[in-house]
Image (cartoon, grey):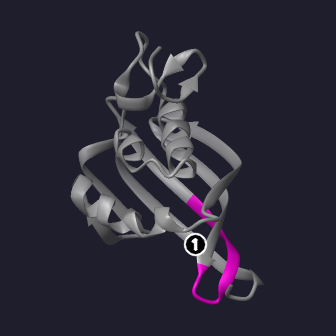
Amino acid sequence: MEEGFRLNGKFGKYGKGSEPMTPQEIVAGQLNAYNAKDLDGFLSYWDADAEYYAFPDTLLARGHEEIRARHVERFREPDLYGRLVSRTELSGFVVDQEVVTRNFPEGLGTLDVVCVYEVKGEKITRAWFLSGTKTILSGPS
């Protein structure tokens, strides 16, 4: 049996599957991998030269190695989880609204995030992240 995240009957992890994935399926796959803390699976949805921005234009990472470096510690957070609130697509751009649960130094908390992904050729090529104010739910453990 193939491994990966099944989306509408298609396997997204590592590009497996016979039908091309839609931009929304690509973004859903990377969010599933993020929530599973599967760094290799997460990166499989990103172009090797992808650009990762803080909105509007602060480049945070370029390419798999820099994106990996940004996520190694984050994926060690025991409560890390991105809950999808809404998703829409227009002309190869997918916009997600998410509430992300994280283990901040101040304690367990959430952060509202708007994510804009540009998808070309079944890969995320650029992404922008706009974060709201974090809410601390409980003190450090």
Eyeballing the image, is 141 above or below 12?
below
Q: Where in the figure is residue 22, as x and y percent of width and height?
A: 49, 26
Residue that appears at 69% across and 78% down? 108
Check disc 1 and report its element: helix, strand or loop.
Answer: strand
Magenta residues, as a range? 104-114
Decide which of 17, 57 is in the foreground and name it: 17
Side (left or right) of 119 relative to 78: left
Q: Where in the figure is residue 126, as x and y percent of width and height?
A: 35, 52
Q: Residues within 10 Å of mark 1 (few under 14, many from 20)?
A: some
Eyeballing the image, is 95 above or below 24?
below
Residue at mark 1: 131
Residue that appears at 30% across and 70% down? 59
Q: Is residue 76 magenta?
A: no
Side (left or right) of 67 relative to 1: left
Q: Main secondary structure of the magenta part?
A: strand
Q: Where in the figure is residue 131, as x and y percent of width and height?
A: 58, 72
Residue farthest along the right direction in this orientation: 137
Residue that appears at 63% across and 41% down? 88
Decide which of 134, 88 is in the foreground and name it: 134
Q: Where in the figure is residue 51, as x and y percent of width and height?
A: 29, 57
Eyeballing the image, is 124 above or below 106?
above
Residue that appears at 57% across and 50% down? 35
Quarter containing the C terminus: bottom right
